[in-house]
Amino acid sequence: MTETNITGRDGPSLNESTVRARANRAGYVMRKSRSMTSLDNRGEYMLIEANRNLIVLGQRFDATLEDIADFIDKRTSPNDGSN
């Protein structure tokens, strides 16, 4: 199995297993597209809220690893009131 690696904005490398583990700890399930790309399947990732079985990101398998990592960071970091 090939591990997908990307470099995030802050420099550290993100890989699929790291992002998947972070998602699981935050209560989400990450799914990777296994089908050929089409209009409804972009060949990337989908993030699902585990306890409600609700797609929260990548409805068309169009979320990247960085998108998912950013989403989880925003949901798990304490709010500093700047938003």
Image (spheres, rainbow, N blue to C red):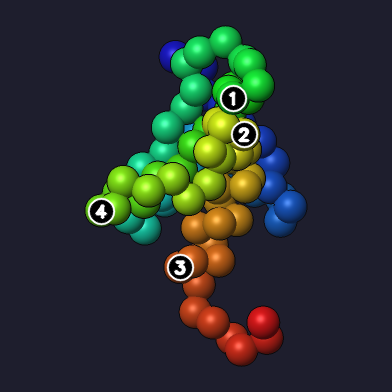
Q: Position of residue 5 (x, y in %)?
A: 61, 31
Q: Relative to residue 23, is residue 62 drawn left or right?
A: right
First reached walking from the N terminus: tag 4 or tag 2: 4
Q: CA distance from mark 4 to mark 2?
A: 22 Å
Where residue 13 appears, as percent x and y from the top left, is 62, 42
Residue corresponding to mark 2: 62
Residue at the image point whose x is 63% and y is 45% from the top = 66
What amino acid is labelled 2 in the image?
Asp
Disc 4 marks a residue whose amino acid type is: Asn
Three-letter amino acid code at disc 1?
Answer: Asp
Q: Earlier in the sequence, mark 4 or mark 3?
A: 4
Residue at horizontal 56 percent and vertical 51 percent from the top: 69
Earlier residue among tags 2 and 3: 2
Can you identify the residue that label 3 sits on? 76
Closer to the camera in the image, 18 or 76: 76
Give the label, 1 or 4, closer to the camera: 1
User: CA separation, marks 3 and 1?
Assistant: 29 Å
